[in-house]
């Protein structure tokens, strides 16, 4: 009986040692995971200016394209209006001369 009790106490002590070791391993894993998470967060924060610069660069590129497109449309419209004015110039001059020469005439 003494031998059995001694073996049970040995097994219980061994189980406690295993449990303590498991607690230490668990704590070490937690600390390691926290350190890794902090390192990843620092890497992300370090990249924030780069990400921001990339976003700004793309936005500026889109703005430049939009401005170019608007300028092209403006130039096209300006040309159309100039062409229309030139087409109507003779008609407008004739109407103005008629008005000057015959101010009382009903036009």
Image: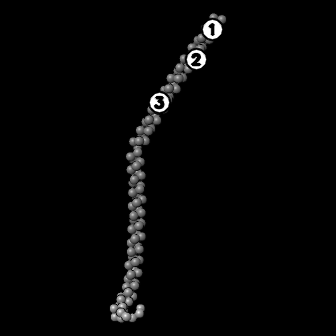
Quadrant position of residue 61: bottom left
Q: Is residue 89 above or below residue 40?
A: below
Q: Which mark is residue 5?
A: 1
Q: Residues within 10 Å of mark 3 (few under 14, many from 20)?
A: few
Q: Position of residue 24 (x, y in %)?
A: 50, 23
Q: Residue 99 or 34: which is nearer the viewer?
A: 99
- Which secondary structure, mark 2? helix
The residue beneath circle 3 is 32
> Which badge, 3 or 1, comes first in the chain's sequence?
1
Residue at the location (39% across, 94% down)?
105
Quadrant position of residue 80: bottom left
Q: Residue 98 or 46: which is nearer the viewer?
A: 98
Residue at the location (40% across, 60% down)?
63
The residue beneath circle 2 is 15
Residue at the location (50% across, 28% down)?
29
- Which secondary structure, mark 3? helix
> Which badge, 2 or 3, comes first in the chain's sequence?
2
Q: How is the image coloured?
A: one colour
Q: Residue 58 or 92: which is nearer the viewer?
A: 92
């Amino acid at each position: 009986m003494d031998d059995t009790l001694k073996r049970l106490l040995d097994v219980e002590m061994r189980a406690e040692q295993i449990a303590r070791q498991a607690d230490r391993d668990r704590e070490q894993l937690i600390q390691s995971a926290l350190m890794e998470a902090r390192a990843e967060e620092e890497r992300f924060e370090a990249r924030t200016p780069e990400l921001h610069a990339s976003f700004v660069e793309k936005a500026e590129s889109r703005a430049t394209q939009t401005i170019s497109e608007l300028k092209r449309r403006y130039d096209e419209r300006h040309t159309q209006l100039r062409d229309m004015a030139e087409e109507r110039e003779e008609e407008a001059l004739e109407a103005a001369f008629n008005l000057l020469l015959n101010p009382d005439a009903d036009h």
